Image (cartoon, helix red, strand yellow):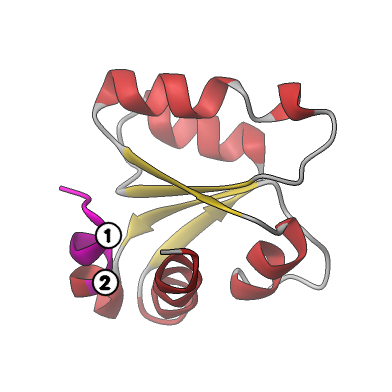
Amino acid sequence: MSEKAYEAIELARKTGKIIKGTNEVTKAIEKEKAKLVVVAKDVTPPEITMHIPLLAKEKGILVVEVPSKEELGAAAGLKVGTASVAIVKEGEAKDLVKGLGAK
């Protein structure tokens, strides 16, 4: 599941649109623009991303947890790790996003 999530982010970054960072991801969820949200498990303190799964569930948006913020950052095209990423426009990642169970 993690590998598919990373792959979806990479494809969406190239052919669609992604949002990086907890604050931006939170806004995308609140506005119901996010199609898929990916959160890293190794974020410290965990309070930084604790609200995201609850908020996304409330809005009916799929959240996938991945083990590494470094790998998540790399998939998003960053040189540093990131706590969370949201796919806003899937682009060519549409089938991958659907395969993960998103609407």
Please tell me whether residue 99 belongs to the stretch shown in magenta. Answer: yes
Left or right, 27 with reference to 75: left
Residue under label 2: 96
As helix, strand or loop, the secondary structure at mark 1 comes to helix
Give the main secondary structure, helix, strand or loop, of the magenta stretch. helix
Left or right, 78 with reference to 3: right
Left or right, 102 with reference to 15: left
From which residue to which does the magenta span run? 96-103
Q: Is residue 39 above or below residue 53?
A: below
| Residue in the image at 62% along x and 23% along y | 50
Label 2 packing within 10 angstroms: few (<14), some (14-19), many (20+): some
To which quarter of the image does residue 54 belong? top left
**C-alpha separation, residue under disc 1 versus residue under disc 2:** 6 Å
To which quarter of the image does residue 32 belong? top left
* Three-letter code, disc 2: Leu
To which quarter of the image does residue 97 belong? bottom left
Q: Which of 38 and 88 is in front in this view?
A: 38
| Residue in the image at 72% along x and 53% along y | 82
Q: Residue 22 carries which label?
A: none
* Three-letter code, disc 1: Leu
As helix, strand or loop, the secondary structure at mark 2 comes to helix
| Residue in the image at 15% along x and 47% along y | 103
Residue under label 1: 100
Q: Position of residue 70 (x, y in %)?
A: 77, 64
| Residue in the image at 40% along x and 72% along y | 4
Q: Position of residue 12 (x, y in %)?
A: 40, 72
Marks 1 and 2 in Cβ contact (< 8 Å): yes
Label 1 packing within 10 angstroms: few (<14), some (14-19), many (20+): some
